[in-house]
Image (cartoon, rainbow, N blue to C red):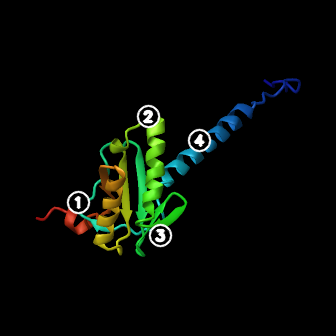
Amino acid sequence: MRFASRRDVARGKADMTPMIDMTFQLIAFFMVIVNFSEGDRNERIRLPISELAKPPDAPAKSPITLHLTDAGTVIFGPDEVSIPGIRQLLEREQRFLRARGDDPRAATIIIRGDRAARTGQVQELIRVCQQVGFERFVLRARQEFASLAELAPSG
């Protein structure tokens, strides 16, 4: 039995516009997310390695990230100043927090010190922050992962 060919049947076409729109929205969303998560990093800072380092349990409230370079300068946002010079920027940040209705004492200062920075510089930076009125501090370090040989069961 032979079937007659149907040439008059219209082929179905899918409208790709909604899918393209959704793809662009997802791309824009992930670009915004990546920019916010990268904001607290600086490629000039090489964090020290610590076996005790662990990821934070919860996000910090009103985080203020300070990058302490190996030269002893502090990077805060686009500004790079000396340790005593950070006081003016922190006072500006404190005024901003108060205007927003937040307590500056509840803000968390995140210090990302370069592994070549001197311990005394970190202590001096904390002292300047305390003089301005900040009370909570977190020091960042890279977590040292155990080698595969150490993870393997002995036996």
Q: Where does label 4 land, which residue?
A: 29
Residue 18 coordinates in the image, percent (x, y): 70, 31
Judge left or right: residue 135 versus residue 3: left
* Residue contact between numbered discs 2 and 4, judged by CB atoms under 8 Å: no
Q: Where does label 1 land, which residue?
A: 52
Residue lying at 33% horizontally and 42% vertically, measured from the top left: 106
Q: Where does label 3 land, which residue?
A: 44
Element carrying mark 3: loop
Q: CA distance from mark 2 to mark 4?
A: 29 Å
* Image vertical order of residue 65 relative to residue 123, above or below: above
The dot on residue 84 is none
Picture quadrant where residue 114 is located = bottom left
Q: Where does label 2 land, which residue?
A: 101
- The mark that comes first in sequence, 1 or 2, is 1
Picture quadrant where residue 29 is located = top right
* Image vertical order of residue 29 relative to residue 66, above or below: above
Q: CA distance from mark 4 to mark 1?
A: 34 Å
Residue lying at 16% horizontally and 61% vertically, measured from the top left: 153
**Disc 1 residue crowd, few under 14, some 14–19, many 20+, Cα 10 Å:** few
Residue 126 coordinates in the image, percent (x, y): 32, 60
- The mark that comes first in sequence, 4 or 3, is 4
Q: CA distance from mark 3 to mark 2?
A: 33 Å
| Number of the front mark, 1 or 2 | 2
Picture quadrant where residue 6 is located = top right
Residue type for callout 1: Leu
Residue 75 coordinates in the image, percent (x, y): 47, 63
Element carrying mark 1: loop
- The mark that comes first in sequence, 1 or 3, is 3
| Residue in front for this viewpoint, 151 or 21 | 21
Residue type for callout 4: Phe
